[in-house]
Image (cartoon, rainbow, N blue to C red):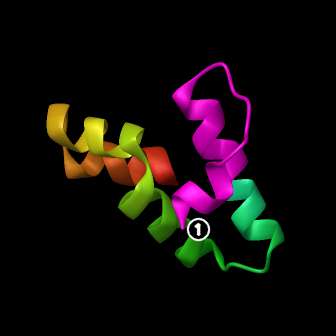
Amino acid sequence: MWQQYSQGVQACTPIKLDYLAGRSAFENSYSRKNVTLVLILGSPYVAQIYREQSKDKVRAYVS
């Protein structure tokens, strides 16, 4: 789902890309919980945070 919402989006940083993809999902009636899951399961940047830091950092990021 993240790929669907991030496709064609122009963003200068991975953070902005995640924000725009999440916002698009939210505007398409996704709940906050489901937007969070879209980011956790699909964002390459979230995967990088998880690998390099911790689950707590991922939770803070997607919040």
x and y percentages locating residue 61 in the rendered image: 45, 44
- Amino acid at pointer 1: Val
Q: SS of the residue at dot 1?
A: helix
Q: Which residues are magenta?
A: 1-21
Magenta stretch: includes residue 10: yes
Q: Is residue 52 above or below residue 50?
A: above
Q: Is residue 37 above or below residue 42?
A: below
Magenta stretch: includes residue 34: no
Camera-side residue of 33 and 30: 30
**Quadrant housing the N terminus:** bottom right
Say left or right for 48 vs 36.
left
Say few, some or many: other residues with alpha carbon within 10 Å of mark 1 (under 14 / 14 to 19 / 20 or more): many
Count the numbered circles shown: 1
Q: Report the residue at 22% width, 52% height from top.
A: 55
- Mark 1 — residue? 35
Q: Is residue 14 above or below residue 28?
A: above
Question: In which image quadrant can residue 25 be found?
Answer: bottom right
Name the dominant secondary structure of the magenta segment: helix
